Every structure is written in structure tokens, then in C-alpha cells.
């Protein structure tokens, strides 16, 4: 550790914690700074402190700070100050800085049978070893094509020269001893692949060196939940009972980033015995002016979240420009409680002598428990040796217990939340062997939904930052941010003519379907219920969507359909001439690879043998562009496929895309790829050759994406509710933007005439 980690915020937080005259805190800070500088001066001639080696000097410095602090301020307050010695490395997470940080000397790659494994980076701290690696070239045929078949589950590890194996711990591996500068990274088999399909027992030799002086390590300020912290909590409810002020929402760690903060905290509702709560929405943050603060979930602080005691750990990263403090952090819950008095009911059904996976029994049995209505709609036998019980309930019911009399399950689960999920919930019971014959079903322990409760906590920075302008200038290329999105107006009447295809929840139904609108939100027409992944033909006259029996092509004017073969199709893209459809599907044991099918019905042709791919789109000259991910979603390779020569060309790599749902889309002129960023919320543009990558929409909740032939881009945005999205229409050349009227769902297709 060196003096660059002793920030003004660090010093200020210690001074305020002391509660003593200013001169005393300066004395302690100077002692701390001097000790830390002496401990970290490794490049100069050794200058031992009391004859100790450097590693022990660091330890002594920490102990000295604790002793001095304890004498001055007492043991309770010095704890929070000393824990600031932890640091945050972007992309790595929160690390222990009590020993020197080391990194990988250089990337290491091994290629076998066309598959390449690369260790791109390593970060070694006193508490763990962080290894970042990527794999490319694994064919889809190496993965199971059924959910009930498991692939490789053996974990990677580091092997030292003496044979010691350092295995996985939370978000990393066990720490490498300071005396060891080399290790072998061992991958027994690539995760989820089938035995014997591809090479196994991968070994990559790694070498470690001291971290460079310019390594970004941000201080982590620990807040102990006590009356002295700048966090307050309160709760309000829409019922007659209001929970008292407590510590239900706490901020435990603060990281100051270049443009804002990362807050890490805990949410633990203070419930009474026998009482529990169900969260009903995403955490919200508002500043003192009432403005909603857009935030992202920092993936690299997962370990810190998991270490939060009890409750639910949370983290939020946000930009601080223009915010008014304090910030209010809110969680909305409903009270969940057992019905009193408890009641039970039973009925029988005949599963037969040999129930088969996928077999369904329509029960439609009405049940009354403690004055509430439940309907057991159906029972399904699953391939994992389980029965699923599907209920429709009244709005006040959350769930109930289900048992098969005389049989003890060895596992189970459930989904939904009754009145919180359109009146549905599901319970699954797993058995070593499925019960057969006439079965008696017991239903009891009804759980009800009570009042809605909002739990709140407030946070302010210890020192107001002066490096955050109230009205920051957007970086070049950025059209909208989460804040400026609030100012976008709806589409003026008559500005555009065309159609928009939405995937949205259907009225008076628990299903989602494909719905057609005019661009002004009028003319609503439900095209298909219980379907998704719909796309327009280039002229907007046809719509294609996948189904269990193939790819359906609908003539929108004649309202007729034809079915093309296409097993497991999704992510479809129509060719510019309207004669072909590219899609991701399954065939010959290949999982999620790219196919092309002619709309006239001739058989589909597989054009790649990678796995978990996504189609980008067609260029005007007829080339097809697609991406294939590195295993683990670390990055995506961009390819083009020439239909004439049938040659595949690797073009570039997208490094900052989301590993979850990249949803890349090629512009009509073939010049740009629009895709979702690593934060799962922003939108980027890049040329197919990888040049001029830049941010366009910053943290707006981008999900669905579709270009029009005129160059406008439609984007589903879920900044308010990711499940009920609005649709943004934007011209990326001018940044002219509009919200489309009356549309709430995920964008499927867009045609502007």
C-alpha cells in the first residue's frame, strides 16, 4: 500500500469518527500516512522499521493504527476506519490490500482441436486469487441436448510446484502464497460439455508479477451500523400498522468511483415472529429533490453482497452529477402470513401405472381453505422425477403446502406468488421414483398476502464532492442518458406512418403474445397468443414467429399462415429480399447454432458449428452477420457468412457486451451493429470490423432493438419496469428521439414508411 490510497475522504471519515480536537486527528493521520509510506517503499533501498521485513511492516502499521485509534477513540469506532484498508478494483471486486497486489505477467493461450483457452488476467491479493479466462471454439455438439443430461461439473483449480491445489472459493480461488510467483491453471473439463466430445485436462502455466503503480484501486469505506453513521431508516405502510424506525435498510460499504458511487448494503425487514415479507419490485433510489436515480448492478461486488449478514445483500452503482442529498433507498414488500385458523383439504387423482415425463392431468378442482378460493388447474409429470401442481387462486392468497399422502419427497420447489403473480403459483415435489396409481393430495398451511410496506434508508456522502458538475456534458456519441430520457416527448401525430410489432402481456390473461399496432399506438390487433420472437418481413407485409411445430409465416393482409420446418427456432432475421430467414435453432445435436431457411419451404441449411450464437442481421449485399460467445460470456466474436462462397470470416470481437442477451442488430446499410452493454442497460454502436465503438444510450434499460429501413432505431426501454417497457424511437445521426404512444412491452419489429 502507498500514499495514493490515503484519500481526503479516508482522512475525513477518520477525523469525524474520532470526535476529538482537530490536532489529535491530524496527528493520527500523519502517523498512519508515515507508516504506510515506509511499508510500501519497495523500489528504494530497504529501510526496515524496527528491524522488521516489509510484510511485517505493513502488519505493524495496521496494528499501530489500531492501537493509536483505540487509545484516542475507543475500540468501537476504530473498527470502521481500519476496514477502509480494503480496496475496489473495477472488474475484480473488493480486495484485501494488507499485502502487495500481484497480477498476471502476460496472457496465456492453449489451442487443442480448434478450441482455444486463454487466461486473460489474474489478480492476486491476500484474500483470494482472481482468474479471468475465456474459451472459444467449443462446438454445439459437445453440449447436452436435453435438460436431464448433465455435462462436466468438475471445478478448475491452481496447482503449485509442490503439488498443492488451490480450489475455488467465493468468486475466485484460494490465495497464492507471497513466496510463489508461478502456478498452473488446470481445467479438468470444459463446463457442461459431455465426456469424450472435446479435449480435457487443460493446463496453462501462469507467471505473476507485482501490480503496476497505476493499477486502479479505489478505497472501500466501511460503515458500521450504529447511531453515529449518516444512515437513517424508517418505514411506511399502506395499512393501519406502520413498522417503527429500525435498521431494515443499511448501507455498509461505500466506494467512490470516478463519476459517482457504488453503495453496498443489506435489506432485512424487521418482522414479528411468524411474519415474513415478499419483495414486490426492484429497489429504488431517489435524491432529495425527488428525482429517481438510475443505477446499475455492479457484478464485480458479488462477494461483498454475499457476505452481508442475514437479509438480502444489495449493491448499486450510479453517477453522482446533479444529485441532491440525502439519497433515499427504498424496498417495497407485502406482508406474508399464515391463515388463522389453519385448514386443510384433500382429494384424489389417478396417475396411472406408468406416468410419463410431460404428461398432464387437467384437474380443475375447486378448494376452499380458511375462507379463500384455490383451484388446482393441472398436475404435470416432469422428466426430473417430480410432479408440478399448478394453482389459480384469489388475489389474497400467496401459496399453500402440497403433499402426496404416504410419500416423502426428496426435493421440490415452487414459483409464482399467487395474488402477486396474476393469481398463479406452482409447487413441485420430487421423488426418487414417481408415485403411481390413485394418489391422495393434501393441501394445507394457507399463506395470505397482507399490507404493502415500504422500507427506506437514507445516505449522504461524508464530504460533498466538487468534481461532479450539476449539468455534465454528454460524451461524444451519447444521445440520451437515464436522466435526459425523462425529457423525451411522445411521437407527434402524423410524423410517421408504419407498423410496430410488440411482444407484450395480453389483457385479462396470464399469457404474453404478439400484438400489432400503428406507430401512433392505435389499431391494436392481437396476432398470436402465447408466442414470442416475432419479426416483420422487409416490406412489413408478413410476420414470422417460431412455434413447437416450426416457423410460422403469416400474411398480415390475408390473415393466412404457412409453416416452415425449423426446430427450436428463435432470434430470427429476414433477408433484405424477403426470400430467406436466418435463425438460431437446433439440429443434428447442435445447440443454438445459426441456420438459414428459404421462405418457399426448402430445407434449412446450418451455416455454423459454434454454440449459443446470435444472429446480427443481413447486409445489403446478402452477407449474413452473426456472433458467437466465448464460453462464460466474456466477449463475443463477430462473423460474416458469404452465401455464394459459403465462407465464414471472423471480423472483430465485442468486449463490452452483456453476456446475458446481447441482442445485436445490423443497420440496414450494414455499417453499424447496435448491441446491449455489459451493464445490461446501455446501448452501444460499433462497425462490423470493430472500429468506432461508442456509447449511444447510457443506462436506459435497453432490451429490444430493431432498425427501420430509413435508419431510425427502435429500442424497448425498461428503466421504470423491466417487464413493462416503453418504446423509444431515435435517429442516431441527429439524436432526435421520441417515445411511442401507448406501447408497453418488448419491441419485436418496426416498419416506417
Image (spheres, helix red, strand yellow):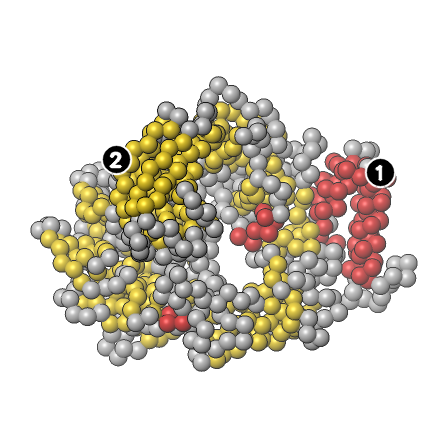
Q: How many marks?
A: 2
Q: CA distance from mark 1 to mark 2?
A: 66 Å
Q: Is residue 352 left or right of residue 278?
A: left
Residue 512 visible at all: no
Residue, x 26% and y 79% (percent of image)?
645
Q: Residue furthest right?
A: 50
Q: Nearer the viewer, residue 250 or 450?
A: 450
Q: Is residue 282 left or right of residue 15?
A: left
Q: Nearer the viewer, residue 217 or 403?
A: 403
The residue at which mark 1 appears reads as 72
From what the image shows, is residue 286 above or below residue 147?
A: above
Instruction: Quarter of the image for the N terminus: give it.
Output: bottom right
The answer to which of marks 1 and 2 sits earlier in the sequence is 1
Image location (x, y in percent) of residue 449: 43, 29
Image location (x, y in percent) of residue 86: 69, 51
Image location (x, y in percent) of residue 47: 87, 63
Image location (x, y in percent) of residue 670: 30, 64
From what the image shows, is residue 143 above or below residue 289?
A: below
Q: Residue furthest top?
A: 240
Q: Is residue 158 left or right of residue 32?
A: left
The residue at which mark 2 appears reads as 508
Q: Nearer the viewer, mark 1 or mark 2?
A: 2
Residue, x 57% and y 43% (percent of image)?
313
Amino acid at each position: 500500500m502507498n500514499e495514493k490510497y490515503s484519500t481526503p475522504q479516508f482522512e475525513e471519515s477518520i477525523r469525524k469518527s474520532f470526535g476529538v480536537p482537530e490536532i489529535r486527528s491530524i496527528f493520527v493521520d500523519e502517523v498512519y500516512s508515515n507508516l504506510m509510506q515506509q511499508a510500501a517503499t519497495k523500489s528504494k533501498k530497504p529501510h526496515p522499521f524496527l528491524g522488521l521485513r516489509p510484510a511485517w511492516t505493513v502488519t505493524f502499521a495496521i496494528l499501530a493504527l489500531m492501537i493509536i485509534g483505540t487509545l484516542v477513540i475507543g475500540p468501537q469506532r476504530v473498527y470502521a476506519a481500519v476496514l477502509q484498508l480494503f480496496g475496489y478494483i473495477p472488474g475484480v471486486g473488493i480486495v484485501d490490500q494488507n499485502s502487495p497486489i500481484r497480477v498476471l505477467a502476460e496472457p496465456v493461450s492453449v489451442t487443442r482441436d480448434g478450441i482455444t483457452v486463454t487466461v486473460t488476467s489474474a489478480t492476486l491479493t491476500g484474500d483470494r486469487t482472481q482468474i479471468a479466462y475465456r474459451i472459444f471454439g467449443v462446438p454445439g455438439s459437445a453440449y447436452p441436448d436435453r435438460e436431464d443430461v448433465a455435462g462436466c461439473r468438475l471445478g478448475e483449480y491452481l496447482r503449485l510446484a509442490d503439488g498443492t491445489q488451490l480450489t475455488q472459493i467465493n468468486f475466485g480461488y484460494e490465495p497464492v502464497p507471497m513466496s510463489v510467483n508461478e502456478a498452473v491453471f488446470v481445467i479438468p473439463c470444459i463446463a457442461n460439455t459431455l465426456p469424450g466430445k472435446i479435449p480435457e485436462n487443460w493446463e496453462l502455466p501462469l507467471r505473476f508479477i507485482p501490480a503496476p503503480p497505476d493499477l486502479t484501486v479505489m478505497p472501500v469505506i466501511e460503515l458500521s451500523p450504529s447511531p453515529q453513521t449518516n444512515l437513517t431508516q424508517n418505514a411506511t405502510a399502506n395499512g393501519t400498522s406502520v413498522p417503527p424506525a429500525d435498521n431494515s435498510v443499511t448501507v455498509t460499504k461505500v466506494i467512490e468511483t470516478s463519476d459517482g458511487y457504488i453503495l453496498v448494503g443489506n435489506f432485512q425487514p424487521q418482522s414479528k415472529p411468524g411474519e415474513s415479507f415478499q419483495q414486490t419490485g426492484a429497489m429504488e433510489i431517489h435524491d432529495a429533490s425527488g428525482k429517481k436515480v438510475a443505477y446499475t448492478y455492479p457484478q464485480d461486488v458479488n462477494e461483498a453482497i454475499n457476505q452481508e449478514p442475514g437479509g438480502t445483500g444489495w449493491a448499486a452503482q450510479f453517477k453522482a452529477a446533479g444529485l441532491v442529498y440525502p439519497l433515499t433507498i427504498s424496498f417495497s414488500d407485502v406482508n406474508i402470513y399464515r391463515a388463522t385458523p389453519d385448514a386443510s383439504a384433500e382429494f384424489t387423482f389417478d396417475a396411472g401405472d406408468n406416468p410419463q415425463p410431460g404428461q398432464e392431468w387437467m384437474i380443475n378442482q375447486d378448494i376452499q381453505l380458511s375462507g379463500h378460493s384455490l383451484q388446482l388447474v393441472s398436475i404435470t409429470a416432469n422428466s426430473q422425477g417430480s410432479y408440478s401442481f399448478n394453482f389459480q387462486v384469489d388475489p389474497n392468497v400467496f401459496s399453500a403446502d402440497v403433499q402426496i399422502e404416504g410419500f416423502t419427497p426428496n426435493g421440490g420447489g415452487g414459483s409464482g406468488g399467487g395474488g402477486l403473480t396474476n393469481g398463479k403459483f406452482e409447487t413441485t415435489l420430487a421423488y426418487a421414483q414417481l408415485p403411481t396409481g390413485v394418489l391422495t393430495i393434501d393441501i394445507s398451511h394457507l399463506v395470505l398476502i397482507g399490507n404493502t410496506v415500504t422500507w427506506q434508508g437514507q445516505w449522504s456522502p461524508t464530504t460533498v464532492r466538487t468534481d461532479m458538475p450539476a449539468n455534465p456534458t454528454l460524451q461524444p456519441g451519447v444521445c440520451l442518458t437515464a436522466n435526459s430520457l425523462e425529457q423525451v416527448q411522445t411521437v407527434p401525430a402524423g410524423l410517421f406512418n408504419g407498423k410496430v410489432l410488440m411482444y407484450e402481456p395480453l389483457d385479462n390473461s396470464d399469457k404474453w403474445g404478439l400484438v400489432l399496432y400503428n406507430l401512433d399506438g392505435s389499431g391494436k390487433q392481437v396476432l398470436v397468443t402465447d408466442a414470442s420472437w416475432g419479426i416483420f418481413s422487409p416490406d412489413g407485409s408478413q410476420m414470422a414467429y417460431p412455434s413447437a411445430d416450426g416457423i410460422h409465416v403469416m400474411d398480415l393482409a390475408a390473415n393466412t399462415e404457412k409453416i416452415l420446418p425449423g426446430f427450436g427456432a428463435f432470434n430470427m432475421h429476414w433477408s433484405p429480399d424477403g426470400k430467406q430467414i436466418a435463425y438460431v435453432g437446433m439440429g443434428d445435436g447442435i445447440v443454438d447454432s445459426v441456420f438459414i431457411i428459404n421462405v418457399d419451404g426448402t430445407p434449412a441449411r446450418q451455416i455454423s458449428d459454434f454454440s449459443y450464437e446470435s444472429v446480427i442481421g443481413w447486409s445489403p449485399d446478402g452477407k449474413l452477420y452473426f456472433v458467437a460467445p466465448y464460453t462464460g460470456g466474456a466477449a463475443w466474436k463477430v462473423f460474416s457468412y458469404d452465401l455464394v462462397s459459403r465462407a465464414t470470416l471472423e471480423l472483430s470481437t465485442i468486449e463490452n457486451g452483456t453476456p446475458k442477451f446481447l441482442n445485436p442488430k445490423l443497420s440496414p446499410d450494414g455499417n453499424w451493429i447496435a448491441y446491449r452493454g455489459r451493464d445490461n442497460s446501455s446501448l452501444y454502436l460499433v462497425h462490423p470490423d470493430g472500429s468506432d465503438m461508442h456509447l449511444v444510450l447510457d443506462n436506459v434499460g435497453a432490451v429490444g432493438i430493431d432498425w427501420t429501413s430509413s435508419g431510425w432505431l427502435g429500442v424497448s426501454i425498461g428503466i421504470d419496469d423491466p417487464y413493462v417497457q416503453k418504446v423509444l424511437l431515435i435517429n442516431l445521426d441527429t439524436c432526435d428521439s421520441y417515445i411511442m404512444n401507448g406501447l408497453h412491452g418488448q419491441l419485436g419489429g418496426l416498419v416506417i414508411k
